[in-house]
Amino acid sequence: MAELLLELFSEEIPARMQSRAAEDLRRLATRALRAEGLEFTTAESYVTPRRLALVVDGLPTRRPDRREEKRGPRVGAPDKAIQGFLRANGVSLDDCEQREAGKDVYWFAVIETAGGEVAGLLPGIVRDLIGALAWPKSMRWGAGATRWVRTLERVLCVFDGSPVALDLPDGIASGGVTSGHRFHAPKPFSVSSFAEYRERLLEARVILDPAERRRIVAYGADELADAEGLFVPDDPGLLDEVAGLVEWPVPLIGRIDDEFMVVPDEVLITAMRSHQKYISLSDANGKLPPRFVVVANLEADDGGAEIVAGNERVLRARLSDARFFWDQDRKTRLEDRLAALEPMVFHAKLGNLAQKAARLEALAGEIASFVPGADTAAARRAGRLAKADLTTEMVFEFPELQGTMGGHYARHDGEGDDVARAVAEHYLPAGPSGVCPSEPVSVALALADRIDTLTGFFAVGERPTGSGDPYALRRAALGVIRLVLENGIRLKLREAFRRAWRGYGETLPGLEDPPETLERELLDFFADRLKVHLRAEGARHDLIAAVFALGDEDDLVRLCARLLALDGFLATEDGANLLVAHKRAANIVAIEEKKDGIAYSGPVEPAMLREPEERALSESLDAVGARSASLVADEAFDEAMTTLAGLRRPVDAFFDRVKVNAEDGGLRANRLRLLSGIRATMGSLADFSQIEG
């Protein structure tokens, strides 16, 4: 068995593209090898800023002979079809055989491919790999036609200990040579195996494994912070990106000038993270200290002093801009910025951001009535100011600070703390695991913003599709779901949609309420998003389906309470046995209804209840139905489910002693209606037919 080592050596690959490229290289290479009939034991890929590497172990040195058979047209088919089959497979009719397949006789092409040295296949495979790797952005260089993410300088290819010449286009070198760190060890060297390749790279100040570079960055930053009594906030995305910028990571600590510490922490952190890829630190109180960690790509003779000084100069210039924006923006109140929202388009069919602000002012105040503790006036004020920071220089420079800066500017303007916090938090939660607002006014505004957006976009036909969601409407719906459930908000979605609709005024058709189709589409959309959310939380898919099958529930808190009660009930012995009985009753009724062509859903005739067991079951259904309906109305779902347990004994006794398909047709129909009553009574709490088991 032999080993294949491949390295694509280039100028610096953007960090955000590295992980995907390494995985694509492994996937495409293994697919190409298998297409040639070559099996192997392992395949691993690695990436640094300047190289993509692949090692495939357990390959044969010779490809075995292959015999492949392909079925073509029927014998006697039109000549055009037969000739097309022959051309497609590169064979003549003499190379084909006639065989029976089913009731017809077909032409079969027999293609025999002689084996050969695997090394002879590699040049073609590697050339195809280079062309097949897809990059978000690629470039050409010089007069060549090859496209790559950056200038591709050299390809190392070693198979079974020997270099493989590849004859690549555009002067790209190939063979068994690579080189190490750009500054520490740029001299080329040859290798004959992956073990030697990895060892020689380490000697040449290149750490091949990105996970190891990430570990070094994290450990080094922690050590530097700990030495000053500070902490490194959790930011896995930044660690991944920094590990993709260096081949030999050397963390160093720098200082932020005190004059910039008057700027909000979020601004300093964003400026350092987004533009410089510096790691911010925090003190014991969670505040930003005047320190940062920069990760160098080399070990300097002076211990990194000059590197730190240079990065401090760069940061000083960057933060000078940020402080200028901070000082300038505060000269204009948020209230005075509202007119500047008019030229800013929210959506071509839904007006501008000034209109959006007016809608939020009204809708946030209305939704505040559903949020315990929310002050209506504060919610309206927060809604009015929520989008004003989009006109500031700071948000123009750092768009990710929208909302956050609005909160800071609102406090500077003297707005109440609840208003400022709501403005700052109204884009939250930012995703499935993001922090969710809990302050009442913040919750009201965050709900209003998303519900306004969802209603408007659905109204003008801008709905998510299976292949795209350009306006992040799925995320908006999930945000509503999390805000409602995590804060226990008893918001009726239909009412919220109607109020949002009215806020659009002349922008949307002049109806008092949204069309029923729009309302239904929005509810269905929320139902789908809630199912996804609940499955992610560990809820059983069949129980979710059972509760949703009731239809038209628009109170998410009540719906989830019903789901939890159902889950708890089915975990009991009575619940499990009653589920079996329900399925039996439902199956019998369904079979007989299909056979007779009628529905047995009418009321039971008390005079036709002959057996004591059917009378007992009828009485239990009446009692349990009335009691459970009352409990459901009071939202006592646990008790309502427990009440169902009262059906277990009479249901069991009925099936043990009563013959449903009696010879008397009237008696049979009455008993089927009785069984249908089991289905109806239990169905008022959930559709038990959806439940597995």
Image (spheres, rainbow, N blue to C red):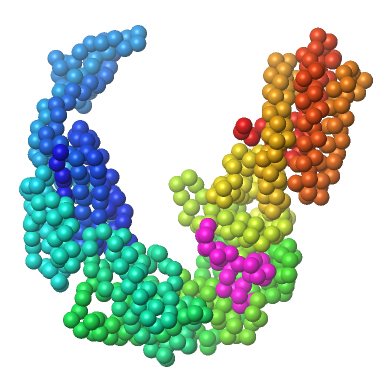
578 left or right of 446 in image: right
Residue 583 is situated, as x and y percent measured from the top left of the image, at: 68, 27
37 left or right of 263 in image: left
Residue 219 is situated, as x and y percent measured from the top left of the image, at: 34, 70
Q: Is residue 295 above or below residue 142?
A: below
Residue 563 is situated, as x and y percent measured from the top left of the image, at: 67, 45
Q: Residue 208's image quarter?
A: bottom left
**If the image is split into quadrants, where does the N terminus sit?**
top left
Q: Can see residue 324?
A: no
Q: Is residue 633 above or below residue 471?
A: above
Q: Can see residue 211?
A: yes
Determine if the magenta segment contains residue 440.
yes
In magenta, the rendered stretch is 419-445
**If the image is split into quadrants, where does the C terminus sit?**
top right
Residue at 58% x, 41% y: name it.
541
544 and 443: which is toward the camera? 544
147 left or right of 263 in image: left
Residue at 71% x, 57% y: name it.
491
578 left or right of 634 in image: left
188 and 412: which is toward the camera? 188
Residue at 23% x, 72% y: name it.
297
Residue 58 is situated, as x and y percent measured from the top left of the image, at: 19, 40
Residue at 88% x, 24% y: name it.
615
Q: Residue furthest bottom?
A: 259
Q: Residue 686's image quarter?
A: top right
